[in-house]
Amino acid sequence: MVSPERTSVPESDVEFVEDLYLRLLGRPADDAGLQWWVSALRSGTSHVDVAIGLAQSPEAIARTNHGSGAGQPTGSHHSWAFEDVVDADPTRLSARTYLEQRDLRRLIEAHLPEGRVASACEIGCGFGRMTVLLTEFADEVVGFEREKEFVERARSIHRGVDFRQVESLSHLSAENDSFDLAVTFTVLQHLVNAQAFEVVGELKRVLRGDVAILVEETDPDHVSGSVDDPGGACTIGRPVEVYQDWMHPFVLVEATPREIEADYPRADVGEYMVFRRGSA
Ligand SMILES: C[S@@+](CC[C@H](N)C(=O)[O-])C[C@H]1O[C@@H](n2cnc3c(N)ncnc32)[C@H](O)[C@@H]1O
């Protein structure tokens, strides 16, 4: 989740969306949601359609069904909604996903000399947007995700991927040394430090192959949300050196900037970091 400056859009659109959030969800708009709906308005979606869209969001429906408690963290954690996964309207989402799949494909081709491997996984796979790409390179592909709704959606829209719901990304339902390739895509950046460190450890536990690719925000100035609350929602840009340290004994063999749609308000949206197993 990446959250551009609110000042980059007309104030009236911002106010319209903020007001809808208060009335339909009973809470202030979060940055990603605000950007999502304001972008929709800017690309021609009518105000009525935005209102309908927000009213039909899982959070609004849950709130209607269960009373005013929804919109708050579910159980012990902040629940992710569909618009949190990619803060882009459908036109930008298609451009972004094209660019991201193109770049991930190029990196896998460059760093997986075997060409095709037996198994690959994505940790924190959302609704499988990037997981499906791994089927081009691996016979067995697993996507691990905490949010039940994402897993259900992923299962219904993608073929050939084993999507597994997990209680925590720190405890993956997989044996040691299960996968030849492991990927995280804009996931660790949303975990507080202790959690992110644990998930990196879990990634190394389930990886038997030599290559892992982490795609995360790396600008240390890009920090927002509840950075100390494991049950909250946050974005933490961590310098590449932090991931290098955490990934030891894997070594960084390539770092390349993440490129997304041309009109995204921030230039630096993180890096693709390719790690190779080194000697301990
Ligand atoms: C920006 S989305 C990326 C999803 C997917 N990798 C993609 O690129 O489309 C972030 C993902 O991290 C997951 N996530 C965020 N915070 C989490 C947490 N504390 N524990 C487990 N999963 C979390 C969300 O459920 C979501 O699937």
Image: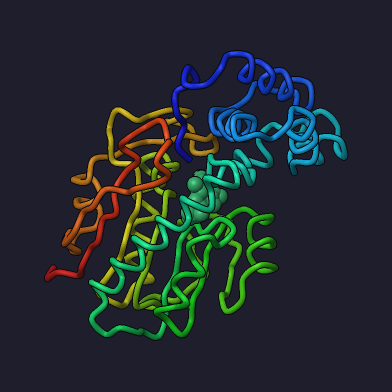
- Determine the residue positioned at 20% across, 64% down: 250
List x then y, in percent, for residue 253: 16, 62
Q: Nearer the viewer, residue 148 or 47?
A: 47
List x then y, in percent, for residue 272: 29, 54
Residue 75: quarter of image: top right
List x then y, in percent, for residue 176: 39, 75
Viewport quadrant of the C terminus: bottom left
Answer left or right for 146 relative to 241.
right
Answer left or right for 179 relative to 167.
left
Residue 20: quarter of image: top right
Answer left or right for 213 relative to 50.
left
Q: Nearer the viewer, residue 268 or 164?
A: 268
| Residue 249 to residue 49: above or below | below
Instruction: Report the number of numbered marks.
Output: 0
- Determine the residue positioned at 73% across, 31% down: 46
| Residue 121 to residue 267: above or below | below
| Residue 186 to residue 139: above or below | above
- Determine the residue positioned at 42% across, 36% down: 263
Q: Which of 148 and 266 is in front in this view?
A: 266
Q: Which of 60 and 94 is in front in this view?
A: 94
